[in-house]
Image (cartoon, helix red, strand yellow):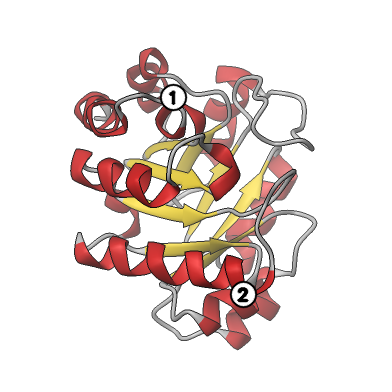
C-alpha cells in the first residue's frame, strides 16, 4: 500500500550532494528509506545518457533493497529505465495523460501547494499528493511560498483516502509534529543527501515517523 511507502520518502539527484550519489543512496537505503525519487534538476544536473545511466544504477540499488524507484517529471525516462512510478508537478504533464502512458502498476504522485491543486489531484486519481513546501527550502530554485503546518493540516483534511506526504525544509525535529497534522510521511532531500552519515539520519527519520 502506497501509504506505508511514504513514511521516509528520499528525493535526490547528483547535484544534491557533494558525495558519490550512489553511496549516499545506498546508505539511505541501509538506513531504511521507504521510497526513492530520482530528481535530476537544477544547476549542475546531468543530462542525456549520463542522466539515464545514473537513473538505471539508482533503480538497481533501490530494487536490491526492495524500495520502489520513482522519477521526477520525466515520464519518458521513467519508462526507459523501467521505473516503478513517476512524480509530476503542477507545471508538468497532466496526471491523466501520464496514466495513459504508464503501466497500471505504477505509482503516480502529484505536487500540491493549495486546496484547489490537492482536490484536482484527488479527482485525477493521484496515488499520493506531495504537499508543500511546508517550510522554506533552498533545494528547489523555483520553490513556492511555504504553507506551514496549518496549510498541511487543511489539505490533509480534504484529501480523503488519498495519502499526503509533506515536503519542503523538513528536519528531524519536525517529523512527529507533521505526522500529527495528518501526513503519512515526509519527503526529504538535503537532510539526508547533505549529511555526513546518511544511514543514521535515514534511520532516525524512520524511527520518528508514526
On the image, the x and y values in percent for residue 40 come to: 62, 54
Q: In this view, does 136 lie above or below 133?
A: above
On the image, the x and y values in percent for residue 200 come to: 23, 27
**Does the CB distance between marks 1 and 2 fall below 8 Å?**
no
Left or right? Give the position of 148 relative to 181.
right
Q: In this view, does 71 lie above or below 171?
A: below
Q: Which residue shows up at 39% across the image and 25% down it?
A: 195
Q: Which residue shows up at 36% across the image and 27% down it?
A: 179
Looking at the picture, tell me which residue is in the foreground, 71 or 18: 18
Which residue is disc 2 drawn over? 49
For residue 171, what is the image quadrant? top left
On the image, the x and y values in percent for residue 125 come to: 56, 67
Q: In which quarter of the image is the C terminus?
A: top left
Q: Quadrant of the N terminus?
A: bottom left
For residue 113, what is the image quadrant? top right
Look at the numbered disc 1 and give the secondary structure of its residue.
Answer: loop
Q: Is residue 63 above or below residue 167?
A: below
What crowding class fits label 1: few (fewer than 14 Cα within 10 Å), some (14-19), or many (20 or more)?
Answer: some
Looking at the picture, tell me which residue is in the foreground, 59 or 178: 59
Looking at the picture, tell me which residue is in the foreground, 168 or 25: 25
Which residue is disc 1 drawn over? 181
Amino acid at each position: 500500500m502506497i501509504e506505508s511507502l511514504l513514511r521516509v520518502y528520499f528525493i535526490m539527484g547528483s547535484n544534491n550532494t557533494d558525495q558519490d550519489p550512489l553511496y549516499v543512496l545506498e546508505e539511505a537505503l541501509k538506513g531504511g528509506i521507504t521510497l526513492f525519487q530520482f530528481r535530476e534538476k537544477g544547476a549542475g544536473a546531468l543530462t542525456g545518457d549520463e542522466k539515464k545511466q545514473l537513473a538505471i544504477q539508482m533503480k538497481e540499488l533501490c530494487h536490491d533493497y526492495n524500495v520502489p524507484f520513482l522519477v521526477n517529471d520525466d515520464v519518458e525516462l521513467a519508462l526507459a529505465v523501467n521505473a516503478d512510478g513517476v512524480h509530476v508537478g503542477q507545471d508538468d504533464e497532466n496526471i491523466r495523460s501520464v496514466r495513459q502512458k504508464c503501466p497500471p502498476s505504477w505509482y503516480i504522485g502529484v505536487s500540491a501547494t493549495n486546496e484547489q491543486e490537492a482536490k484536482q489531484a484527488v479527482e485525477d486519481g493521484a496515488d499520493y499528493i506531495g504537499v508543500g513546501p511546508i517550510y522554506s527550502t533552498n533545494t528547489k530554485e523555483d520553490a513556492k511560498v511555504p504553507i506551514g503546518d496549518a496549510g498541511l493540516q487543511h489539505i490533509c483534511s480534504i484529501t480523503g483516502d488519498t495519502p499526503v506526504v509533506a515536503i519542503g525544509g523538513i528536519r528531524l525535529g519536525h517529523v512527529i509534529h507533521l505526522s500529527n497534522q495528518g501526513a503519512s510521511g515526509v519527503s526529504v532531500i538535503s537532510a539526508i543527501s547533505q549529511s555526513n552519515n546518511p544511514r543514521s539520519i535515514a534511520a532516525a527519520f524512520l524511527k520518528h515517523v508514526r
